Image (cartoon, helix red, strand yellow):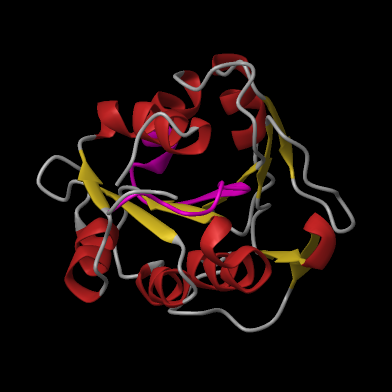
Amino acid sequence: MPGPGRHQTAYEIVAIGSSAGGVKALLAVLGALPAGFPVPVVIVQHLDPRHDTILADILDRQSRLRIKLAETGDLLEPGVVHVAPPDRHLLVDSGGKLSLSMVDKVKFVRPSADLLFESVAAVYGPAALVCVLTGTGSDGAAGAGVVKSRGGTVIAEDPETAEFEGMPQAVTKSVSVDLVLPLDEIAGALVGLVEGTRTL
């Protein structure tokens, strides 16, 4: 029986939301995750909708994980990172299948971390682990609230040290965040939580 404060359920997915300053932050986090990371990762990084992106290629060169631009119908796999393409919401459906959506922007953005987090919460409940990194605005806060309401876990980059404090600050102000960490400690926390060597 888990002791007090220990998470009762093994995590099955990590979802990350970021915006301004996010490419550098994602490089730091993904670059520090081990090759055998045992769960899938899904990412919403706000991108210019008018251009194709090489974000997945940039991240893939710096990470030991396989990183790809998400496509409708992709199945989540351990150790594979799926990045939302520009101007498409990324959603996780039951059975770990991904879908892309052109529904309206949320808080002026598409893709939306809120919608990704809400879909992850609906499918994975307490097995969901989400993280909000640097960014302007408040995307991710509402979705993180849904994750918490389903028993999941929320990590925020420390707004004091984030390149842009808006998104992490919005989450810490509106949600009882489980961990607030400087950027260089986030990958280690994700590994520890997923592998069960770190407790909350």
- Placement of 35 over or under 168, stated as above or below: above
Residue drawn at (57%, 67%), measured in percent from left and top? Answer: 125
**Residue 167, located in which quarter of the rendered image?**
bottom left
**Which span of residues is magenta-colored?**
5-26
Residue 28 appearing in the image: yes
Front-most of residues 53 and 88: 88
Residue 163 appearing in the image: no
**Residue 44 appears left or right of 138:** right
- Total tally of numbered discs in the picture: 0
Looking at the image, the residue that sits furthest to the left is 160
Front-most of residues 58 and 159: 159
Task: From the top left corner, tell me how far across and down residue 48 is, in percent.
Answer: 54, 54
**Residue 162, located in which quarter of the rendered image?**
top left
Looking at the image, the residue that sits furthest to the right is 73
**Residue 93 appears left or right of 142:** right
Task: From the top left corner, tell me how far across and down residue 73 is, in percent.
Answer: 90, 56
The answer to whether residue 10 is magenta is: yes
**Residue 187 appears left or right of 102:** left
Looking at the image, the residue that sits furthest to the bottom is 104
Front-most of residues 67 and 177: 177
- Placement of 174 over or under 86, stated as above or below: below
Residue drawn at (30%, 68%), measured in percent from left and top? Answer: 137
Task: From the top left corner, tell me how far across and down residue 50 is, in percent.
Answer: 63, 57
**Residue 23, located in which quarter of the rendered image?**
top left
- Placement of 142 over or under 8, stated as above or below: below
Residue drawn at (57%, 69%), measured in percent from left and top? Answer: 121
Task: From the top left corner, tell me how far across and down residue 178 is, in percent.
Answer: 28, 55
The answer to whether residue 172 is magenta is: no
